[in-house]
Image (tube, rainbow, N blue to C red):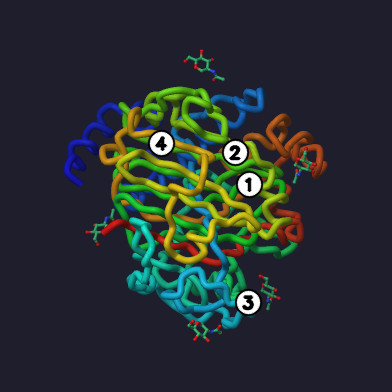
Amino acid sequence: MRLRTQLLLYLLVSVTPSNASLFARGPERLLRGVSSAHRRAVERSAALAKDLRRALSGVLVEQAVSDTAVQHVYCISGTSLTGNGSSSSDGSDSGGGSGSSPAKGSGTATASGSSPSSTSTSSSPWKLKQAYQGNSFFDGWSFFTASDPTDGTVEYVGQSTAASNNLTSINSAGHAIMRVDTTPKVSGNRMSVRITTNYNYTGALVVLDAVHMPTGCGTWPAFWSNGPNWPAGGEIDIVEGVNTYTNNQATIHTNPGCTIPSNSSSVLDITGTVVGPTNCAAAQTDNQGCGIRSNSNISYGPGFNQIGGGVYAMQWDDNGVSVWFFPRSDIPSDITDGSPDSSGWGTPMANWPATGCNPSTYFYQHSAIFDTTLCGQWAGNVWSDTGAPGQSESCASITGTSSCSEYVQNNGAAFADAYWEVGSVKIYQTS
Ligand SMILES: *[C@@H]1O[C@H](CO)[C@@H](O)[C@H](O)[C@H]1NC(C)=O
Ligand SMILES: *[C@@H]1O[C@H](CO)[C@@H](O)[C@H](O)[C@H]1NC(C)=O
Ligand SMILES: *[C@@H]1O[C@H](CO)[C@@H](O)[C@H](O)[C@H]1NC(C)=O
Ligand SMILES: *[C@@H]1O[C@H](CO)[C@@H](O)[C@H](O)[C@H]1NC(C)=O
Ligand SMILES: *[C@@H]1O[C@H](CO)[C@@H](O)[C@H](O)[C@H]1NC(C)=O
């Protein structure tokens, strides 16, 4: 918005060699302008996340190299899953799912998801602006088909290719499926999907309800968001992790000037743990960002899937940015009812208060993103590491393969569990 041009110039001039290298990666990226900036941001974020995790686990792998930082932001929020394409009855639990038609036919994403009118009568300040669910889930998202910015052993395919290869579908419960190709052997990259909302928001409550998320050695899924001119528009990673990890990490990446005022969980009033620097500036901390790891081993991966997932809610308002995770059995009724009100949700897993990082300065025009990449700057870089929650044994040891990419290329069946099953993504705003 306002400072966009200035910020972009600032980036070009002072963002450090790593940013420069990003810009230098390929002419096509420059041509893509904003969207490429988003992706880079994402990629970088991912790398950062990796670094953070390494640091946390006490296993310092190589420093985040150059331009790849942390990527990914997921928002898994969930309320009750509706098996129904109807978006106005947000959250209503339709016991028996209905929609079962695969989204195979849909060629191109439409301009936006459904825009239900708010029917909230509660004290919730949030109005539902976009709801992605049911048979129309994939409407309103763009499929990213450029090479993976995080150097994964992955090929992101377009909407029709994804549908024809059964990488995307709507299951019998009306939930959106996003899978990784399970062809036994591939010679190059393995197919996967990365989608971005066409809609963007400045300030929002994003609620992700997911039943299942990708997991397993080689995987690196994320539900996240970013704004234009990364990192000027900021990046918020809601759900992210790699390999056999069990604890989610939420991370923000920004321009210089944004910090976490403390690394103490009690001071921040969060249930999670700060796992990296308190300076969130991508350009000043090798793009590590400010990462906060959940203390719950059902917040990500196998544990998350065992309980039928749950809801991730990311609130971005004048007070800052916060992330909550609610296991399936513990989703607040106001979320299920479609009138979310965080005042009753208790302590968030993560919080980046406005006192250290004014959200109206460091974040704007975000689009939400799902992706599942393989290996690359994070999953690949920690392939032989141990120490992170859920990775007490390294993937090199678990798989008996020293190379993540080699494993990914030759063991398609191992990626049967590398899928997202999403009940809904809902974007609420106050006006
Ligand atoms: C979807 O929801 C609408 C409105 O609540 C309802 O009339 C319809 O029967 C539902 N369809 C299915 C398949 O559940
Ligand atoms: C497509 O994938 C789903 C799992 O997401 C699976 O249940 C179904 O059998 C697959 N269909 C085909 C034709 O392979
Ligand atoms: C966000 O949406 C507004 C309104 O449609 C549009 O003008 C703006 O260009 C979008 N920003 C980005 C970064 O896509
Ligand atoms: C918290 O921050 C202080 C001061 O910046 C630092 O000395 C300490 O190592 C940090 N603690 C952790 C766990 O990162
Ligand atoms: C989570 O931690 C508990 C307690 O240590 C353990 O019993 C359980 O198996 C763990 N679950 C997962 C999915 O790692």
Mark 3 touches mark 4? (CB < 8 Å): no
First in sequence: mark 2 vs mark 3: 3
Q: Amino acid at mark 2?
A: Ser
Q: Give the residue displayed 45% in from the left and 27% down from the top.
A: 286
Is residue 164 or residue 83 the one in the foreground?
83
Percent across and percent down for residue 181 are 65, 63
Give the CA separation, mark 1 to mark 4: 21 Å
> Relative to residue 44, is residue 110 drawn left or right?
left
Secondary-structure class at tag 4: strand
Q: Give the residue displayed 52% in from the left and 56% down from the top.
A: 77
> Relative to residue 370, is residue 40 drawn left or right?
left
Secondary-structure class at tag 1: loop
First in sequence: mark 3 vs mark 1: 3
Mark 3 touches mark 1? (CB < 8 Å): no
Give the CA separation, mark 2 to mark 4: 18 Å
Mark 1 touches mark 4? (CB < 8 Å): no
Mark 2 touches mark 4? (CB < 8 Å): no
Write down the residue under mark 4: 253
Secondary-structure class at tag 3: loop
Q: Give the residue displayed 61% in from the left and 27% down from the top.
A: 56
First in sequence: mark 1 vs mark 4: 4
**Badge 1 density bin: few <14, some 14–19, many ≥20, Cα 10 Å:** many
**Badge 4 density bin: few <14, some 14–19, many ≥20, Cα 10 Å:** many
Marks 2, 3: nearer the viewer:
3
- Say which quarter of the image contains residue 287: top left
Give the CA separation, mark 2 to mark 1: 7 Å
Number of residue marks: 4
Q: Amino acid at mark 3?
A: Gly
> Relative to residue 242, is residue 320 drawn left or right?
left
Q: Amino acid at mark 4?
A: His
First in sequence: mark 3 vs mark 4: 3
In the rendered structure, find residue 294 and report the number of the disc placed on it. 2
